[in-house]
Amino acid sequence: MTKPYTEESMSNSIKTQILEAEEKLRLAMLHSDVDTLNKLLAPELVFTNHGILQK
């Protein structure tokens, strides 16, 4: 029988998911993996860089 999630275990699970997603994003950016970036980032996201607006 599987134990129900506790607040702590749920929190750890969410933290793990966030860390995994951030690592996927970092690697996709590092390798210019456009397919993965398209899956991870919302189309509405806008990056800014040194005062220049970029999408």
Image (spheres, rainbow, N blue to C red):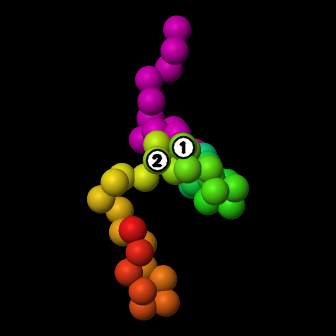
Q: Is residue 34 magenta?
A: no
Q: Amino acid at mark 2?
A: Asn
Q: Position of residue 11 (x, y in %)?
A: 47, 46
The stretch of residues the image draws in magenta is 1-17
Q: Which label is found at residue 38?
A: 2
Q: Is residue 29 above or below residue 52?
A: above
Whether residue 44 appears in this view of the structure is: yes
Mark 1 highlights which residue? 35
Residue at the spot x=62%, y=50% of the render? 33
Quadrant occupied by the C terminus:
bottom left
Residue at the spot x=42%, y=86% of the render? 52
Marker count (numbered): 2
Towards the viewer: 47 or 19: 47
Q: Looking at the image, which residue sits at the far left?
A: 44
Q: Looking at the image, which residue sits at the far bottom?
A: 51
Mark 1 and mark 2 residues within 8 Å of each other at the beta carbon: yes
Q: Position of residue 25 (x, y in %)?
A: 57, 54
Residue at the spot x=41%, y=75% of the render? 54
Tell me the SS state at disc 1.
helix
Q: Which label is found at residue 24?
A: none
